[in-house]
Image (cartoon, helix red, strand yellow):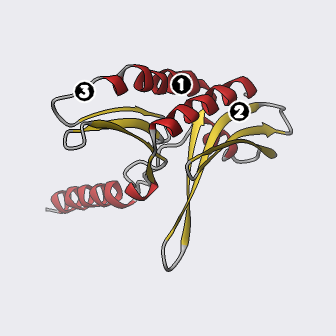
Amino acid sequence: MKKLISLFTSILITFNCALFCQTAKPDSSNAEMFASKPELFIEKQFIEIGFVDMIELRIMKIKDLNSRKTRNALRFEYQTTNQIFSQTKLAIVDEDELDALIASVHSIITKEFIIEKETYTEVTFQSRSGFVAGAYYTIDKKKWIPFLQLERHDSKSTITVSHEDYSHFLDLLKQAKKMI
């Protein structure tokens, strides 16, 4: 009987630890993980690239001043406001993801925007940290609507933009790629 109680107690403790001891870390970019490592002496530089609608794009250069190791990324920042408070939404796209983002946005502009669809359709690029650039085709308006989403599963961080702004976004991405 003691063995049965001991076994039951062990299972219960294991189950509780599985539920409450895990800390689910949100998806992070490589740059964010590098900058948050303990025992590093970090310098961050932010170089302004420009705006797409109300979203500011900046190059983020991170350097460990002790080892001289560096990481570069593209940072997106958007201020949301309501009657009570203001909130900043941030997203990071790592340097190694930038080519895929540029190719995806270019494809959306040059291929998807010219094709009419028969059903609601979405095309998206998603970075490892949760930033999404994409477009959706709406049947009732019969047109593509481009959007940028800074935080995964957060509709308040989503901005729809004009086709012109999306083309400007592509230009800013190419400019950032040259500067990184």
Mark 1 / mark 2, whichever is N-terminal: 2
Describe the element under mark 1 as helix, strand or loop. helix
Q: Residue at x 44, y 39 (%)?
A: 132
| Image coords of residue 135 (percent x, y) | 37, 36
Whether label 2 touches label 3, CB < 8 Å: no
> What is the number of the mark on residue 116?
3
In this figure, which residue is indicated by the disc labeled 2? 71
- Front residue of 89/44: it is 89
In this figure, which residue is indicated by the disc labeled 1? 102
Disc 1 to disc 2, how far (Cα)?
19 Å
| Image coords of residue 41 (percent x, y) | 81, 46
Whether label 3 touches label 1, CB < 8 Å: no
Look at the image and tell me in which quarter the N terminus lies: bottom left
Mark 2 / mark 3, whichever is N-terminal: 2
Q: Is residue 25 left or right of residue 171?
A: left
Describe the element under mark 3 as helix, strand or loop. loop
Q: Nearer the viewer, mark 2 or mark 3?
A: 3
Q: Residues within 10 Å of mark 1 (few under 14, many from 20)?
A: many
**Eyeballing the image, is 116 above or below 164?**
above
**Eyeballing the image, is 12 above or below 96?**
below
Describe the element under mark 2 as helix, strand or loop. strand
Q: Is residue 92 left or right of residue 43?
A: left
| Image coords of residue 42 (percent x, y) | 79, 45
Q: Residue at x 50, y 80 (%)?
A: 84
